[in-house]
Amino acid sequence: MSYRKDSDSVELGECTRNPGYKDADGDGPAARDNISVSDSEEKRDSIGVKRLSDARDEYTQIKPYAGMPKEVLVLYSSKARYRVPREILFWLTVCCTLALVAVTIAVIALSPKCLSWWQASPVYQIYPRSFKDSDGDGVGDLKGIKEKLDHFEYLNIKSIWISPFYRSPMKDFGYDVEDFRDIDPLFGTMKDFEELLATMHSKGLRLIMDFIPNHTSDRHRWFNLSRTRDPHYEDYYVWTDCKPDGPKPNNWVSIFGNSSWTYDEVRGQCYLHQFLKEQPDLNFRNPDVINEMIDIIHFWLDKGVDGFRMDAVKHMLEAPHMRDEPQVDPNKPPELVTTEWDLHSDYTTSQVGLHDILREFRAQMDIYSQEPGRYRFMVIESYDYEEVYKTMMYYGTKLEKEGDFPFNFYLLDLPQNTSGVWAKHLVHLWMGNMPKGKWPNWVVGNHDRTRISSSAGQLYVRAINMLLLTLPGTATTYYGEEIGMENINVTASQIQDPAGKYNTSASRDPQRSPLQWNANMNAGFNDKTNLTWLPLHPDYETVNVEAQMKDDGSVLAQYRFLNTLRQSELPLNRGWFCYVHDDANVFSYIRELDGLKRAFLIVVNFGKESAITDLSSVRELPDELKVLMSTNKANDGKVLPKSRIQTEVGEGLVIQYSTNTRFNPNHPEECYISEKACYLETIGILYKCQ
Ligand code: GLC
Ligand code: MG
C-alpha cells in the first residue's frame, strides 16, 4: 500500500522511512531511528490498511500533505503543536461569543427606546377632496394621492393622515359614513386603496385613517334597521320619545347649530345627532355597537393601515338621564340657546365610560402592534378648550394605554395675540399639563380651522413652521402649510360645507381649497378638465410647490430644511426642551442633549416689532452665536453676540452652538424631556441615564 503526494513526489512504500521528516519536537532521523517498528508487528486488515496502533509511528514521520486520509490526519491533530493552538482558538471563540452576548444584552438594557415612526416624522394631513384629482371630476381622489407621493419623499415626511374616504352621501364630506368597509366611488375603489397603501409602504410611508365612531350617515344600513325597530339594531342609536311638532326632548344642541334632536317619521321617535341631522349618534351604551366598531378597526388593521385619527370622540356617550344642560347665560331665553357656546356640555361630552371604550380600541390596536416594526398609532381629536386636563386624559394612564397623543390645538390660538409671551403661554399649556413621559404634538391647522397663514398673517408663516419643527414632539402639517397656502374667499353661492350653509361665517370651505402644485391649469390639481370643487386661491401662480422647490429661500425649502435637520439632530428630535426667554416679541428656547456638545438655540419673533434680545445672562451659551438658519435667508450664517440677537417681525433663527455646559441641570424647572437619554460622544451612542 502506498500514499502518494503528487506535487512533491513523496512516495511511501511499505515500511519506507522518510529521511526528510523532522517533527515539531526536533526529532530527526536519529530520534526516529529509536522508534522501532518491527515488520513483524505490522498487521493488515482485510482491505489492506495498516491498523492505526501499529502504523502510528510510521505515519507521523511523514510531512503533512493535502488529501491525507483521516487516520493520518488524526495522528497529526493530536500532536501538541496542532492541539494547543486549536484549543486556544476554541476558548477564544467561546469567550468572544459570551462577551458579545453580554455586550448585546448590556446595550439593549442601557439603550433608550428608539423613536417610533409617529414620533420621528411630522404627521401630514391630506384632505382627499383637495389634494390631487386624477380623473378630472374636480374632486381629489386616492389615485391622485398615489401620483403625488414623491412630495413626501422630498419633504422627508413619513406619516400621512388621510381624512375620510369611506362610502358616504357626503353631507359632511365623508364624516357621514354609509359603509365603514367601502370606499366612496368619488375617491376610487378598494383596489385603488390597496394599491395606494402598498405603494406607500414600499416607500416607507405610513397611512393613518380617519375613524369616526360617534355617528354614521342616516343612510347607513344600521340606521335603517334601527328606525324600523329590527330587534338587533333597535338600540344602535340614541332614541327617545317626542312629538313630530312638539317640544324637543331637551335643550341639547348640535355642533352645527340648533337642536340635536330630529323626529323620525318611520320610527315615530326622535334621534340624537350631535352634528348634522344626517349624522345620527351611535349608542355606545350598547355593547353590540362597541363590538361593531372593533370589527371595523380589525378590518382596516388587517388591510395594513398604520393608525387611526379618532374623530369627535368626546361626543360618544351622553348622560342617560337626558336632562337639560346648564346654560352659560342662565338668563338667555331658551329659544335663543342654539349653539354649543350657549350650553355647558356636561351631559353630551366627555361622559364617564368614554375612556374605557377608547382603551378597548387601543388594546385591539396593540394586538396588531406586536409585529416588529408595525406599531399602530392612535391620535385623538377632542376640543376641550380651557379644560386641558380633559384633553390630557386621552394619553391614558401608567397602567392603561389610550391615545399616543390627543391633538394639541392650543397653537391655533396663536393669532389671538401674536407675541413671544403668548406663544410661550400656549406651548406651556401643553408642556405644563402633559403627563410625565408622554410625547407632545403641535397643530396649527386642519380642515375645520382657518389656515394659520390667514389668521396670523403671511408674515408669521415661516416662524410658525420653525416653531412646529423645533419644539419637542410631533408636528402636524395640514396640506398646504408647507408652502404657506392661505384661505380662499368663498361667496355665499359657492358654499359647499353644510356648516357654512347654516352659518356663513362657520363655513370650513375657505381652508379646503385645492393644493397648489404648480402655475399651470387649476394649479396642477386637476390637469384634465376645468373643474375644481372649490375655487383655487388666486395666488397659486406664485405660491405653489413647483415654484417653491426652485427657490431655496421659499417656505417649502425652509420647511424641508428644518424637517431634515430635526430628524438628523438628536437634540431636536429627542433632547431637552428648555425655556430661555419670552417677551412681547420674542420666544426663545434651547434644545440640548446630555453628553452632546452640539445644541440649538431657537429665537422666534412672534411680536409686532423687531427686537434685540439680550441673552448674556445665559451662562451656558457661548458669547458668539452663529445663525444656522434664519427665516430670512439673508441672515443665514451671521454671527451674533449673545447680548444682541436681532430679529425682525416674523423672523425665526435656529442657532447651533457648541458647549460643555448643559442648560437643563441648572434650570430643571424650565426644562422638559419625554424620555431621558444621554449621549456618549466618544463612541457615538445613546444610553439611558438618570
Ligand atoms: C370632526 C371633524 C369634522 C366633522 C365632525 C363630525 O370634528 O374634524 O370635520 O365635521 O368631526 O364628524
Ligand atoms: Mg354620541
Image (tube, grey):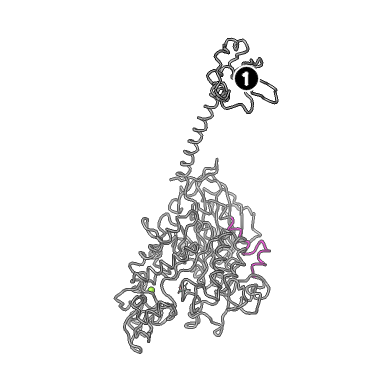
The quarter of the displayed image where residue 516 is located:
bottom right
Outermost front residue: 46
Question: Relative to the observer, which residue lies in front, 547 or 44?
Answer: 44
In the picture of the structure, the residue carrying the numbered disc 1 is: 62
Q: Residues within 10 Å of mark 1 (few under 14, many from 20)?
A: many
Image quadrant, ligand 2: bottom left
User: What amino acid type is highlighted by mark number 1?
Assistant: Ile
Residue 468 visible here: no
Residue 62 visible here: yes
Question: Relative to the observer, which residue lies in front, 55 or 155?
Answer: 55
Task: Determine whether 621 is above or below 170 in the image.
Answer: above
Mark 1 element type: loop
Q: Is residue 552 magenta?
A: yes
* Residue 294 drawn at (x, y percent): 40, 66
Q: Is residue 27 magenta?
A: no
Give the residues in magenta. 543-564
* Residue 417 drawn at (x, y percent): 50, 69
| Quadrant into which the N terminus falls | top right
The quarter of the displayed image where residue 203 is located:
bottom right
* Residue 649 drawn at (x, y percent): 58, 65
